[in-house]
Image (spheres, rainbow, N blue to C red):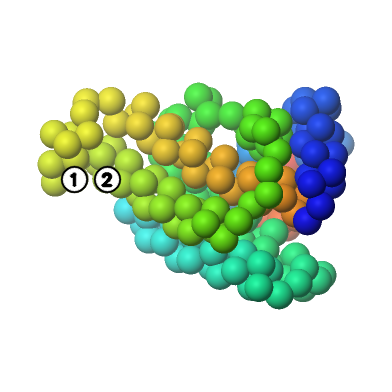
Amino acid sequence: MKKDYIITCYDKYKLTGVCMVTINNAKIENLTAIYDMALGLERWFPNNNSAFAYGTRLCEETGELVEALVNVEDGEMNPDTKRHLIKEIEDVLQIVTGVLGIYQLNDRFPKDLSRFISSETPRQATKNDIISISVYAGQFADAINHMESQGIKKQKRGNNPAERLLEKAHTFVAQIALFLQHYDLLDELENQIKDDYLSLAERGFIELIA
């Protein structure tokens, strides 16, 4: 990926500010739309939506995202690999927003992925950054355990589990946003969000804004 291409992506989102997904003539911030989808999936599949169930899905979806990134890094970005990567990114972001929703923390988290892209100086992503996604996912899972007071987490991690969960979620999503920037995928991710949002709405699991 050429450096000037990455900077163009960075500058685009820095200049435009909040990126909105247009769904049924309503404009919705992209992470807000993803959280709506997470809630829609909970309505579709009402069992096993506890924090620990989300933690299990976090492990599964992060593994699939890392695998998709490695395949792109070792091969080439073609329409199929791009589509697969975008879907895996969307799935992981649904997990993050869903977990934050359990603890009513989404209002304290950025609602727009461009905030993560424009807040960091653009740079090339590396294979070490792919590894870091797994590391940050583990830290996010650890913060879920902290929220649930599992074992001696509060003794080890302190008495502010909500702040720590928000911090780890921010670090995790920022690392994912690095690859959105690196491959210039945000516009296509938003198209995927729109399609999946409307699909859930057609099934009656999301109420569209008039």
Quadrant for the N terminus, please.
bottom right
Work out whether residue 197 or residue 99 is closer to the camera in this orientation and state it.
99
Labelled disc at residue 150:
1
Q: Amino acid at mark 1?
A: Gln
Q: Residue at x 13, y 41 (%)?
A: 152
Q: Label 2 to label 1, Cα distance in Å?
A: 5 Å
Above or below residue 156? Residue 200 is below
Residue 134 visible, this orientation: yes
Above or below residue 154? Residue 192 is below
Q: Quadrant of residue 79?
A: bottom right
Percent across and percent down for residue 46 are 45, 56
Q: Residue at x 42, y 38 (%)?
A: 168
Residue receiving disc 2: 145
Q: Earlier in the sequence, mark 2 or mark 1?
A: 2
Q: Going by the image, does 164 lie left or right of 39? A: left
Q: Going by the image, does 99 lie left or right of 68? A: left
Q: Going by the image, does 68 lie left or right of 183? A: left
Q: Secondary structure at mark 1?
A: loop
Label 2 CA crowd tier, 10 Å (few <14, some 14–19, many 20+): many
